[in-house]
Image (cartoon, rainbow, N blue to C red):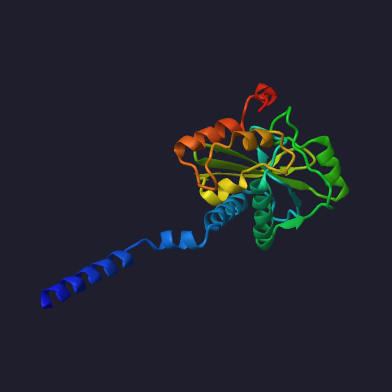
């Protein structure tokens, strides 16, 4: 009996030791699904602040717009909407003068001349709300990694006042935000039709590749019928 109790005590001590040695970050991540996304937005805002080429006495009125898919500049997602919202708050608290357009106003990026050339309609809107710079951005998902590029663009001449790039792992929380349903992107039909993932399970590497292929399909693929 005594030997059995000693063995049981030793096993309990070993179990406690293993549990106590688990990384605290892993436990925190499971309790905070959005922590990785929050850290991404915080790092992006810090890089924008650090890289800003502004005069000391410059007083810019900055309009922050939705980020768009780099391969489809007409398409955004919940990720493309939530990330700029985070940046608005973080940059505002850091001293930048952030303004908001009235609801219903659409800010566009000119597709034919490059991802960071503001369209004429965007410039007109910026002038109407007395905005001197626009913070725009793009993102691209590829094989489990998401790359985000943000640039502060001068309205009068399209000069780049600041820029920042981040490449990070696409965890389940961020991956769910990338789904384009309901935001005016025609490619969402292909995503819904293919359904390469079982249920809500986060896909593995193979399925990630399938998502990449079907989320950015060729134009002729939309002529296919179910």
* Side (left or right) of 5 relative to 27: left
Q: Nearer the viewer, residue 143 or 126?
A: 143
Instruction: Return the x and y of residue 69 as percentages of the image width and height.
Output: 65, 38
Q: Could you tell me which residue is drawn at 64 percent across and 48 percent down?
A: 79
* Side (left or right) of 20 relative to 106: left
Instruction: Return the x and y of residue 179 as percentages of the image width and height.
Output: 63, 43
In which quadrant of the rendered view does residue 187 lie? top right
Q: Could you tell me which residue is drawn at 75 percent across and 33 percent down?
A: 110
Instruction: Return the x and y of residue 26 as percentages of the image width and height.
Output: 42, 59
- Going by the picture, which residue comes out furthest to the bottom? 2
Instruction: Return the x and y of residue 205 as percentages of the image width and height.
Output: 45, 38
Q: Could you tell me which residue is drawn at 62 percent across and 50 percent down?
A: 48
- Going by the picture, which residue comes out furthest to the right? 128
Q: Is residue 70 visible?
A: no
Q: Is residue 16 visible?
A: yes
Q: Quadrant of the C terminus?
A: top right
Q: Nearer the viewer, residue 130 or 187?
A: 187
Q: How many marks?
A: 0
Q: Quadrant of the N terminus?
A: bottom left
In which quadrant of the rendered view does residue 89 lie? bottom right
* Side (left or right) of 150 relative to 9: right
């Amino acid at each position: 009996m005594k030997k059995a109790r000693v063995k049981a005590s030793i096993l309990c001590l070993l179990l406690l030791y293993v549990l106590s040695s688990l990384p605290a970050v892993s436990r925190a991540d499971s309790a905070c699904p959005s922590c990785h996304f929050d850290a991404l937005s915080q790092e992006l805002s810090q890089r924008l602040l650090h890289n800003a080429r502004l005069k000391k006495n410059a007083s810019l009125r900055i309009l922050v717009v939705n980020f768009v898919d780099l391969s489809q500049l007409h398409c955004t997602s919940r990720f493309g909407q939530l990330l700029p919202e985070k940046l608005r708050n973080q940059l505002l608290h850091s001293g930048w003068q952030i303004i908001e357009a009235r609801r219903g106003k659409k800010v566009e990026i000119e597709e034919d001349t490059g991802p960071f050339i503001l369209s004429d309609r965007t410039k007109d809107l910026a002038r109407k709300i007395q905005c001197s710079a626009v913070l725009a951005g793009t993102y691209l998902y590829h094989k489990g990694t998401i790359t985000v590029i943000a640039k502060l663009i001068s309205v009068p001449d399209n000069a780049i006042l600041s820029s920042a790039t981040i490449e990070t792992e696409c965890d389940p929380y961020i991956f769910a935000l990338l789904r384009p349903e309901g935001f005016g992107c025609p490619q969402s039909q292909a995503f819904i039709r293919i359904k390469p993932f079982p249920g809500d399970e986060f896909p593995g590497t193979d399925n990630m590749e399938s998502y990449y292929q079907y989320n950015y399909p060729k134009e002729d693929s939309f002529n296919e019928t179910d």
